């Protein structure tokens, strides 16, 4: 890992930058309900949010939805048959089949943090009685980047196309057709060029942000599909309440039902506070302390560190 | 029933929301001569007052045509001429003062289509980056300041209409583009496929009790909430006309934000994309014969060029959707207004008793789905530019609806007779929307030319760049065929603004 970081980001990367030098501990209640320091992450565990993968560079994806585990889980859960399959989509969900299936199955994220296409495609295959499995090697790959509108000024002052091969280098993975599996590419002016990427424009706009390139970058995962026996049982739909936010109508919240909350009309403003986007202040979890104590790190649960001093934060305006 | 906004049909131009539905449509592109702008403004004001067709007039004419079509009667031959006008960003600045065009948040309109050509996948000069082989619009100088669209039942009508416009302007303008399109038999385009079948339904009322877009689902059918008729989704008018609620892709049944805010310049106006698309019909059908050979070889059963062409388009020549009849055209579908476009891809459309007098149309039998692309491949043109209810990389059905445009295309050039004649023929593509970025540009740059989006299968066979590898599933087997030729090329184009008539008059005074 260290070698890879040094190769991809900087030769200055040090082991302690990447691996927790001490355990990460939180102060909370242990299994017996006693207040104590609890180990969250052990010493020497890899830290995916290290500075070389966040503020100083980028080596891999960090959002939990972009992990291999999330990919496998989404594909697996989507491969079940659900009560909604083969039925018309729900009118209250935009008559949208993908949204209807996500709401029924409870996979992914109803507000579309996850790509609705993946679950829908898997569902369509199993509905057609096909077996689906992720293709080996499993990965969330870059399939390509469209640089056909990357331009720079030439010596005559005119905008000319930057040839893809001049600026784009595939560092890891392959773009070989028909199944490109790119893991990393870089975009940069060629060595020795008299221009910089910042001199370019992309789709007629000054190239100033990575997001402009990300917008033109496609991601892909591959699945093997074959005829065979499938589990033909239809799983029941998620019985929780699915409600639209009162003001932000495109935003959904999923709520457990209880005697006081049987319909969306009974969902209170306070209930909505637990869902983003927030309209106010909410306590999400009760945790009194959080730290990486290098001077007196506990060696395990039950260590006798003094309780942390909890500072009261004033609520934002 | 949802509360839908009252549309100002006396101010919105008829070509925007309704279309003219005439046999001939002439495009007249004019450059305003600096130093004679006052003369041109007087002429324009006169034309706006007396010649431009209001949406209300166009809607009444369309309703007559619709009623006649439903009872199977021939169209009345009336000498009605429809007329619309639109301004380029340069034209707007000339008439209203430098900087007016900057009021548009859509930078594509401000910069012009010629500047967008590279991103659209058009052939461009390697040095200058400007489009090659365009008859108009390949630079600011060749982009009309003012574009007129004159429509009528006879060629002579539109010629006279255009001449009258030119006479009004006198020597204050120069003609830089003049071309007459005409509808060809069966409402087809030159490759022979029935065209213009699918249009989004515009929400809104023309008066207290009348919807602009006729509703065929009875009110007690849940589909009436979101659909005008089978296959025609309803969307909010702000997607096409400034000053009205737009579409929130995540809450499609509720009015979104007012597009254009309260800007009086934009109100009741729309952005117009014009593309002159030349079609090489001989090359297309030779390519389809080659594609049929490849498919025959790959599947071991005979394919015809017509079948290969249907796979590329997504419909048979007569308009029958492949999803509903994968093996052959079906006149019971193509002759039925409701079945012709009444389908989705992922979910079947339920059967319904429609609110219509005609017994053959009333009993809609439903439509099967084709989620896995077994009948209509993912690369088919109509599936590429409108995946309907299929989710994709940017979201779901609401996101797709958000990119749909009101299309007003008309063919140009002589009929194809099956003999190579080197004639220039094709389609004058026109579309209205309030965001070129979200509509036309997004479809062209992110889906048409991308083999993997919106669904992996290949680049658009009609509009995409070459070479193309097309993937499809036949008899349960995945096969790949190639389509190396290009038979549609842009040969002109521009981005324009079709203003509301009051806003235009206020600019001119």
Image (spheres, coloured by chain):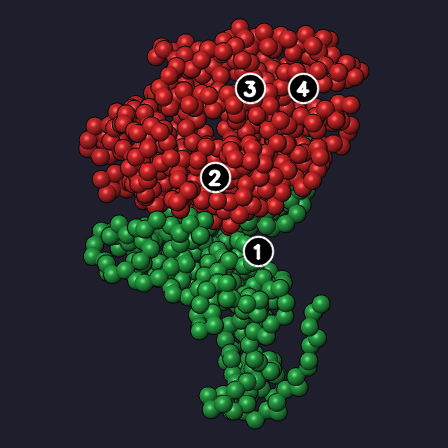
Chain colours: A green, B red
Q: CA distance from mark 3 to mark 1?
A: 48 Å
Disc 2 marks which residue?
B234
Same chain, labels 4 and 2: yes
Please identify, in this view, whether the residue under mark 4 or under mark 3 is nearer the observer: 4
Task: Give the SS element for disc 4.
Answer: helix
Looking at the image, is B218 positioned above or below residue B129? below
Residue occupying the far bottom of the picture: A304
Disc 4 marks which residue?
B48
- Camera-side residue: A283 or B394? A283
Disc 1 marks which residue?
A248
Q: Earlier in the sequence, mark 4 or mark 2?
A: 4
Q: Residues within 10 Å of mark 4 (few under 14, many from 20)?
A: some
Q: CA distance from mark 4 to mark 3?
A: 33 Å
Q: CA distance from mark 3 to mark 2?
A: 38 Å
Q: CA distance from mark 1 to mark 2?
A: 21 Å
- Would residue B99 be visible to someone looking at this image? yes
Q: CA distance from mark 1 to mark 4?
A: 41 Å
Q: Position of residue A37 (x, y in %)?
A: 55, 87
Q: Position of residue B214 (x, y in %)?
A: 45, 32
| Left or right relative to B311: residue A227 | left
Residue occupying the far front of the picture: B209
**Residue A162's quadrant in the figure?**
top right
Q: Earlier in the sequence, mark 4 or mark 3?
A: 4
Q: Mark 4 belongs to which subunit?
A: B
Looking at the image, is B32 positioned above or below residue A3? above
Q: Mark 3 belongs to which subunit?
A: B
Residues tagged 1 and 4 counted as in contact (Cβ below 8 A):
no
Residues tagged 1 and 2 counted as in contact (Cβ below 8 A):
no
Please identify, in this view, whether the residue under mark 3 or under mark 2 is nearer the observer: 2
Task: Give the SS element for disc 1.
Answer: loop
Q: Which mark is residue B133?
A: 3
């Amino acid at each position: 890992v260290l070698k890879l970081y040094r190769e991809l980001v900087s030769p200055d990367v040090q082991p302690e930058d990447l691996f927790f030098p001490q355990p990460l501990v939180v102060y909370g209640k242990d299994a017996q309900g006693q207040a104590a320091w609890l180990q969250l992450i052990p010493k020497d565990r890899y830290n995916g949010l290290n500075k070389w993968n966040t503020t100083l560079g980028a080596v891999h994806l960090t959002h939990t939805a972009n992990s291999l585990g999330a990919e496998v889980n989404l594909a697996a859960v989507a491969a079940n048959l659900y009560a909604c399959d083969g039925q018309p989509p729900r009118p209250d969900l935009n008559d949208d089949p993908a949204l209807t299936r996500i709401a029924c199955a409870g996979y992914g994220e109803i507000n579309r943090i996850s790509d609705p296409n993946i679950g829908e495609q898997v569902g369509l295959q199993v509905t057609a009685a096909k077996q689906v499995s992720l293709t080996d090697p499993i990965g969330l790959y870059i399939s390509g980047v469209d640089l056909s509108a990357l331009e720079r000024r030439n010596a005559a002052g005119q905008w000319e196309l930057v040839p893809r091969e001049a600026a784009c280098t595939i560092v890891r993975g392959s773009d070989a057709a028909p199944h490109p599996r790119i893991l990393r590419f870089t975009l940069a002016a060629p060595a020795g060029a008299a221009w910089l990427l910042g001199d370019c424009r992309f789709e007629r706009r000054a190239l100033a942000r990575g997001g402009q390139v990300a917008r033109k970058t496609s991601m892909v995962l591959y699945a093997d599909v074959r005829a065979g026996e499938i589990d033909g049982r239809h799983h029941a739909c998620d019985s929780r309440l699915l409600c639209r936010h009162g003001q932000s109508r495109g935003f959904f919240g999923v709520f457990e039902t209880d005697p006081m909350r049987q319909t969306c009309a009974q969902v209170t403003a306070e209930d909505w506070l637990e869902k983003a986007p927030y309209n106010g202040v909410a306590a999400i979890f009760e945790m009194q302390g959080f730290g990486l104590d290098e001077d007196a790190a506990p060696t395990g649960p039950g260590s006798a560190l003094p309780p942390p001093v909890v500072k009261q934060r004033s609520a934002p305006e | 029933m949802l509360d839908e906004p009252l549309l100002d049909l006396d101010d919105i131009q008829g070509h925007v929301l309704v279309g003219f539905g005439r046999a001939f449509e002439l495009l007249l592109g004019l450059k305003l001569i600096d130093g004679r702008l006052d003369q041109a403004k007087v002429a324009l004001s006169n034309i706006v007052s007396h010649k431009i067709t209001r949406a209300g007039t166009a809607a009444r004419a369309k309703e007559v045509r619709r009623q006649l079509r439903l009872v199977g009667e021939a169209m009345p031959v009336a000498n009605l001429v429809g007329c619309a006008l639109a301004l380029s960003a340069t034209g707007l600045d000339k008439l209203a003062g430098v900087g007016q065009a900057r009021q548009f948040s859509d930078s594509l309109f401000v910069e012009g289509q010629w500047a967008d050509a590279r991103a659209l996948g058009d052939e461009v000069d390697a040095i200058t980056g400007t489009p090659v082989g365009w008859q108009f619009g390949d630079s600011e100088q060749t982009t009309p300041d003012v574009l007129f669209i004159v429509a009528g039942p006879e060629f002579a009508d539109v010629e006279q209409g255009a001449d009258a416009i030119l006479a009004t302007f006198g020597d204050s303008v120069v003609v830089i583009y003049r071309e007459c399109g005409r509808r060809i038999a069966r409402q087809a385009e030159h490759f022979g496929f029935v065209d213009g079948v699918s249009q989004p339904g515009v929400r809104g009322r023309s008066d207290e009790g009348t919807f602009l877009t006729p509703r065929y689902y009875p009110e007690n059918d849940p589909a009436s909430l979101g659909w005008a008729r089978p296959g025609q989704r309803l969307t909010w008018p702000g997607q096409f006309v400034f000053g009205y609620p737009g579409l929130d892709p995540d809450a499609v049944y509720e009015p979104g934000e007012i597009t254009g805010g309260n800007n009086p310049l934009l109100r009741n106006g729309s952005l117009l994309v014009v593309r002159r698309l030349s079609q090489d019909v001989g090359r297309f059908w030779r390519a389809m014969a080659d594609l049929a050979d490849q498919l025959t070889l790959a599947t071991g059963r005979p394919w015809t060029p017509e079948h290969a062409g249907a796979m590329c388009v997504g419909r048979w020549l007569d308009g029958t959707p492949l999803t509903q009849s994968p093996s052959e055209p079906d006149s019971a579908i193509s002759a039925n207004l409701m079945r012709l476009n009444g389908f989705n891809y992922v979910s079947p459309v339920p059967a319904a008793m429609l609110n219509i007098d005609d017994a053959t149309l009333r009993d809609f039998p439903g439509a099967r789905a084709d989620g896995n692309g077994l009948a209509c491949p993912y690369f088919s043109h109509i599936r590429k530019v409108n995946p309907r209810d299929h989710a994709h990389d940017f979201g779901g059905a609401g996101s797709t609806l958000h990119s749909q445009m009101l299309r007003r295309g008309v063919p140009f050039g002589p009929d194809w007779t099956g003999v190579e004649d080197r004639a220039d023929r094709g389609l004058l593509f026109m579309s209205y929307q309030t965001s070129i970025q979200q509509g036309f540009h997004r479809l062209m740059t992110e889906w048409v030319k991308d083999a993997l989006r919106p669904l992996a299968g290949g680049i658009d066979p009609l509009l995409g760049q070459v070479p193309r590898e097309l993937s499809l599933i036949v008899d349960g087997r995945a096969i790949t065929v190639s389509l190396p030729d290009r038979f549609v090329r842009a040969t002109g184009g521009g981005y324009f603004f079709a203003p509301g008539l009051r806003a235009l008059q206020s600019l001119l005074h």
